[in-house]
Image (cartoon, rainbow, N blue to C red):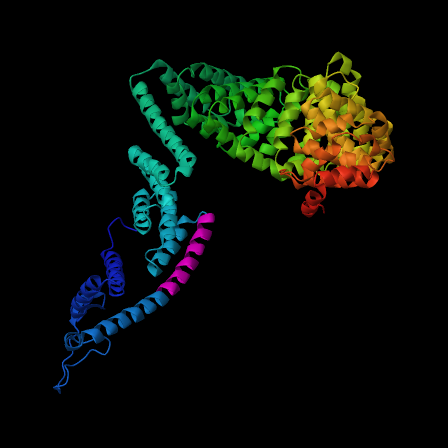
Amino acid sequence: MSGKVDPELERFLREVDEITDLVEGIRSDDPAIRDKAFQKADEKLVKHSEESEVVEGCRVKINRTLINKNPSTDAPPQNPNLPGKYEMQGNREMSQENFLSILERDAEERGKRRKEGQRLASALKEKGNAAFEKEDYVAAVQYYTEGLEKLRDFQALYTNRAQAYIKLGKYEDAISDCEWALKCNENCVKAYVHMGKANLGLKKYEEARQCYQKIITIDPNREKLAKEYINLLELAQKKEQQEKRVMEEFERGNVNTATAHEVLKKLSSPNKIPFFYLGGVRFLTELMKECTEQTLFRTNGGFGVINDNEVIRRSLVSSEKELCEVELCVSVLALWKAVCHENEENQRMLITSSDTSELLLSLLSCKESEIYKECLALLSIFLLTEYGRGLLLCNLNLTRLMKILIGFVNYSDETSDTAMKILTNLIPEKKFRKHCQNDFAIHVIPSFEILLKNLKLANKQILPQCISIIGSLASDKTTSGQIAGREEFWESCLICIDEAMISITMAEYRDVLYTLLGLMVNLSIEQCTAIQIKTPAITERCISLLASVDGGILTRAAGLLSHVLPQSDEAVAGAVKAGMVKKMLKFIKAGGKITTRYAAKILAICSSRSEEARGEIVRSDKKFNALRKLLSLDDDQVVGNAALCLSHCFEIPGAAASLLKTDIVRMLLKHAGGDAKENSLQQNAAIALGKLCLAEPRHKTELRELHGLEILMSCMKYIK
């Protein structure tokens, strides 16, 4: 579409606005507004006696006045579709009614035509979108244009066609379409996005910046999007300035730029021995001191020189490398590192070059330490900026990258540290986490399981960091479900715990064990068959860990137990037999907030599933001092579990009688009739109070004195 304004479309839109205003005026309750509207309507009807028609492609004025060859004294000749002048003057009320009727008929016809136009235009838009997806931008433009012929004010067609024009490099046409889209909707964000891109293509940086800033004005929630476009704009400006400076330096005869130019020419020579290229690459790397030399490398096709050289390429891709090929490969990586340092455009050129992304991952997997270390150093350069991270996220196979990096945990030197730093930088990115949802458990977790099963081979300083990374990714519901559902994962965790417990007194693997237990606690929230199968074995390990003197280990072991015990009666029986009740009562008396929460839940679970546990609680704490202490806390979860545990214990003969002359009735009644956030607390307290009174009728007397029966009746809705 050209940049000229279509006068016919503007005239049409203007007439629609005028007629709309007339109809609203005629229907107004204000007589003055109504009379004024009727007057304008009369004038418009007279003016309509002459209409424009299209004759053979030309617009001409046709006098539509009808001549009656047999005049009558009653009335002048009439147009069958419009009220005549005489009628308007002689019978104003009838003229007004006819005019309104004509307008309504016209609006209905226009509505039908518009609806059909919308249907056809939408179908053409879909065809255009399909062509755009296939990168057939010429066809897309044609479909969008045909759609606009059906419906001239279809905003999406203008913005879609603008996007296709940008792909074709027709930036002026794209800007024109964006302007038309803004006529349809002055707050169209897409129009400003594409107009900004088109201006950027024309190197009109200030105009592009204004477009992107306008996005923030329209919708402050799009600020991040606008800033991303502004960053790209600034990179384009920076690139242009760099290349201009290179030309100036080259014309002035700058030694480094001239030499780099000559070296690149020599490297383009084919069929030389590997050492010839090795020397050239190393010399070129030494010249990459400043941004000027980096830019010259790019503008003189440096990336292509390296990629197209058969000898260099063979050294990069060969699986079994000779010594000279290893050295050449390391030198090329060092060169790429030098030309990409703090140079975003060079980073983009490298990572988007043909097969480079796959090549980097292959080199990262190489068994030659000099190669994978240099490759890790190169990737680390990309992480220095948000733009560089984005390049890695968009161009690398993230699943494969993570699998490779996790494998470096077994290395004892700085390699494992560098690998984990790269992962730590990438995992907060939304794109990385979303990618992990797909096949993370299938392709990455098996490598992690191997690490856990071979604890003695892993770097014990780096492994906790690796476990934390897995835990961070497992915060996503989909990913956590995939991991928790793997029986192999739980088995590898148990093997790791066994290895760590051998040296736990020396605290050699304390951090590994602490971090792993945290991951297991979080994943054990899932309800799945794999956890149910492994619950007895997990419980056994946790019972052993409860003998530790390390408070952190104790707390996380208790947390894991509180999650897995409900999934296995066998595990509950084993825990009770191992003295779990006394351990949990001891934790409650110690008073740690988190540990107390876990202990209360474990006691509630054990007392629910085991008569032996209920008896042990009664024997160990005859006055229920520990549980009554929990009832006075502000933690609804702890109080609810304490009340639940008491209700189970009241089934033991004599347990309820031991609480006579205590404040148990008052405390339970307070929670049963209180205003807790969770209904489960009121439910558990009410049930405990009911069982207390049934087991020992003397408590019922106190309940009546406190009007407790009425309170219990009012909270019956909470009892399921």
Q: Nearer the viewer, residue 482 or 293?
A: 482
Left or right for 173, reference 696:
left
Is 543 displayed left or right of 222 in the figure? right
Percent x, y of residue 221 = 42, 38
Residue 458 visible in the shown view = no
In the image, residue 127 lies in the stretch drawn in magenta:
yes
What residue appears at the point 49 percent right and 24 percent down from the top-left corner? 382
The verdict on residue 531 being magenta is no
Pick out the residue farthest to the front: 705
From the viewer's perspective, is residue 299 above or below residue 118? above
Q: What x and y, as percent, mark residue 611? A: 86, 35
How many discs mark residues in the rendered view?
0
Q: Which residues are magenta?
A: 114-133
Q: Is residue 121 above or below residue 104?
A: above
Q: Quadrant of residue 330?
A: top right
Q: Is residue 46 above or below residue 323?
A: below
Overall secondary structure of the magenta section: helix
Q: Is residue 445 left or right of residue 619?
A: left
